[in-house]
Amino acid sequence: MNIGDWTERFQGTRALPREVRDRLLQVAQVRSYSKNQQVFGPQNVPDSLFFLFEGTIRVSQTSENGRDIVLYRVDAGESCVLTTACMLAEEAYNAEGLAETDITVIVLPRLSFDALVSQEPEFRSFVFAAYSRRFIDLLRVVDDVAFGRIDVRLADRLLALVGGDKEIAATHAQIASELGTAREVVSRILHDFQKRGFIAQSRGRIAVTDKPALRALADST
């Protein structure tokens, strides 16, 4: 697949010196994954760094009792911090990356990654700046799960999932995994939201009927 100068797609790589960008173009590969295909998982020791050129990857973790929690999403124009962390530690992934859409990724092999990090200060700064930003995001997830009100978090998540649409195609179990809680908890609060006129529910779908009310709840403390 020829996608031209992909370094223009990413803010971090776009700011690199031209000679560093040319090295990236020489050593990186382009791969495609279909929607719902696993991009990486706990059984893999990463051998490359991913830059997401197009699409969305959902990164989630499953506990021993089978409960899922969504850690973060990688959107087009971003790199995946988990692959960076696991490559640096030389350990297998402790989470799964699933393609939420058809995706195109830029793959930087481990040897090339190591060489660029050691030889190019600008590339090294780019990698660790991205790592730091995502680490802060993960701390917010921990804080939300540990201390956040579940009704406030659910209202915020519903608004994020619905975006500019009117309906969300998701089960209670899927939404529970987004929040790191039990399906029964989500079902109970959604039932309350429906009674208050915030949403309307049908099998596998949730219609948001009062976005301003949800936004007021999501912004409350």
Image (tube, helix red, strand yellow):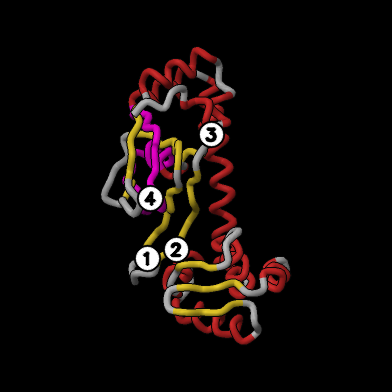
Numbered disc in front, either 4 or 3: 4
- Whole-angstrom CA distance, mark 1 to mark 2, is 8 Å
Residue 221 makes an appearance in the image: no
Q: Which residues are magenta?
A: 83-110
Numbered disc in front, either 4 or 2: 4
Q: Is residue 123 above or below residue 59?
A: above
Q: Is residue 209 above or below residue 22?
A: below
Residue situated in front as seen by the camera: 12 or 146: 12
Count of picture labels: 4
Categorize mark 3 by other alpha carbons within 10 Å: few (<14), some (14-19), many (20+): some
- Whole-angstrom CA distance, mark 1 to mark 4, is 20 Å
CB under 8 Å between callouts 1 and 4? no
Give the residue at mark 2: 69
As helix, strand or loop, the secondary structure at mark 3 comes to: helix
- Whole-angstrom CA distance, mark 1 to mark 3, is 28 Å
CB under 8 Å between callouts 1 and 2? yes
Give the residue at mark 4: 99
- Whole-angstrom CA distance, mark 3 to mark 2, is 25 Å
Residue 213 makes an appearance in the image: yes
Numbered disc in front, either 1 or 4: 4
Q: Amino acid at mark 1?
A: Ser
Q: Amino acid at mark 4?
A: Ala
Q: Is residue 194 above or below residue 66?
A: below
Q: Earlier in the sequence, mark 3 or mark 2?
A: 2
Q: Amino acid at mark 3?
A: Phe
Seen at 40% across and 20% down, the residue is: 115
Categorize mark 1 by other alpha carbons within 10 Å: few (<14), some (14-19), many (20+): few
Give the residue at mark 3: 128
Instruction: Give the side of residue 65 with respect to residue 53, left or right.
Output: left
Instruction: Give the side of residue 90 with respect to residue 194, left or right.
Output: left
Where residue 207 appears, as percent x and y from the top left, is: 55, 73
